[in-house]
Image: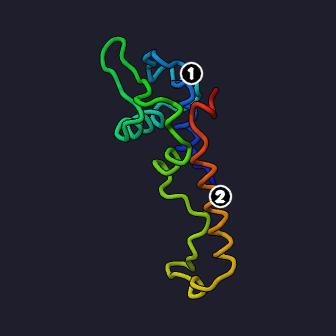
Amino acid sequence: MFLARSSDYAVRALCFLSNNKGRTVSAKELVKETGIPYPFLRKLLQVLGKKKILVSRKGLNGGFELNRKASSIYLREIIEIFQGPFKVTECNLGKRVCPNRGYCKLKHKMDEVEEQVLKTLEGISIAGLCS
């Protein structure tokens, strides 16, 4: 799976926050507007807060806001936060590393594909994706 549910949900939440810039949005409103289940959303918001992408405000009018401009939050960053480093192929056979890895022509081509995908993901900001 290229895009895990957690990354997809994070992008949905960030898009909603991006389109409501300057306004603190409650978790309840995020659930209502994005359709993300509350327990899942709560975990996502915690992670995004720890990574300094969001800021949370407590209290009666509490909620969440972007901590950075949406134009400086890129899809690659979000995917790597929730899924780890992006890899097209790991070249593993079970628990062993493939013995052909050093001279495999397919591995070389897949590395080129991976490089192009990463460049593309680095060029897609939340602002551009959600405008």
Left or right: 92, with 48 as reference point: right
118 and 2: which one is in front?
118
Q: Could you tell me the amino acid type at mark 1?
A: Asn
- Residue 81 disc label: none
Work out whether 20 lies above or below 76: above
- Residue 102 falls left or right of residue 116: left
Which residue is farthest left?
59
Residue at 37% from the left image edge and 36% from the top image edge = 52
Residue 112, image quadrant: bottom right
User: Who's the residue at 58% across and 76% down the image?
Assistant: 91
**Furthest-top residue in view?**
60
Could you classify mark 1 by the number of other residues whose Cα lies within 10 Å: few (under 14), some (14-19), or many (20 or more)?
few
Question: Could you tell me if residue 1 is visible in this image?
Answer: no
> Going from the N terminus, do you reach mark 2 or mark 1 first?
1
Discs 2/1, front: 2
Tell me the residue at 45%/48% (across/down).
Answer: 81
Q: Which residue is mark 1?
A: 19
Classify 118 as above or below 90.
above
The quarter of the image holding the N terminus is bottom right
The kind of residue on which mark 2 rests is Gln
Residue 122 at x, y percent in the picture? 57, 47
In the rendered view of the protein, which quadrant contains the C terminus? top right
Indicate whether 72 appears above or below 112.
Answer: above
Q: Which residue in the structure is indicated by mark 2?
A: 116
Any part of residue 24 in sight? yes
Q: Residue at x 58, y 22 (%)?
A: 33
**C-alpha gap between disc 2 and disc 1:** 29 Å
Q: Say above or below: 52 vs 100.
A: above
Is 103 placed left or right of 83 in the picture?
right
In percent of width and height, residue 111 lies at 62, 69
